[in-house]
Amino acid sequence: QVQVVESGGGLVQAGGSLRLSCTASGNIFKIYAMYWYRQAPGKQRELVAGFTSSDTTTYADSVKGRFTISRDGAKNTMYLQMTGLKPEDTFVYYCHFVVDGRAYWGQGTQVTVSS
């Protein structure tokens, strides 16, 4: 079994910064891809950023230039550095790992940006 746990959400003023972390643990042979998604109540989950299975990075247009994804392979951990936060970045953020051909989601962490 694999567990995925996020941390780092919170309340921040517009223009501020937050860093999210996500760690996968358990019976892991290889992590093929890692992504951050976000979701508002009653809305579909949307891709924010990620490391694809081709080992490239991808970003949603709405966060390019403000958010940066990074990782520590030794720790099976992925980060999302968010700067220049806007009220419209208020969502629950989820991390998504593809491990040994199976998909795992974290429990989500709330990010709230006040104006």
Image: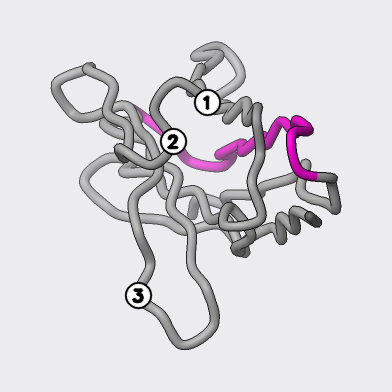
Q: Residue at x 61, y 38 (%)?
A: 22
Q: Kindly give the residue lying farthest to the left in the view shown.
A: 54
Indicate which label's residue lies in the foreground, 3 or 1.
Answer: 1
Q: Residue at x 40, y 44 (%)?
A: 48
Total labels: the figure holds: 3
Which residue corresponds to mark 1?
Answer: 66
16 on left or right of 46: right
Per the image, label 1 sits on a secondary structure element best described as loop
**Closest to the observer, 93 or 104:** 93
| Highlighted range, magenta | 14-30
Per the image, label 3 sits on a secondary structure element best described as loop
Where residue 1 appears, as percent x and y from the top left, is: 49, 55
Instruction: Looking at the image, tell me whether mark 3 or mark 1 is earlier in sequence order.
Output: 3
Circle 3: residue type:
Gln
Residue 21 colored in magenta in the image: yes
Callout 2 touching callout 1 (CB < 8 Å): yes
Residue 44 marker: 3
Which residue corresponds to mark 2?
Answer: 63
Corner quadrant of residue 56 = top left
Instruction: Looking at the image, tell me whether mark 3 or mark 2 is earlier in sequence order.
Output: 3
Q: CA distance from mark 3 to mark 2?
A: 17 Å
Q: Residue at x 75, y 45 (%)?
A: 7
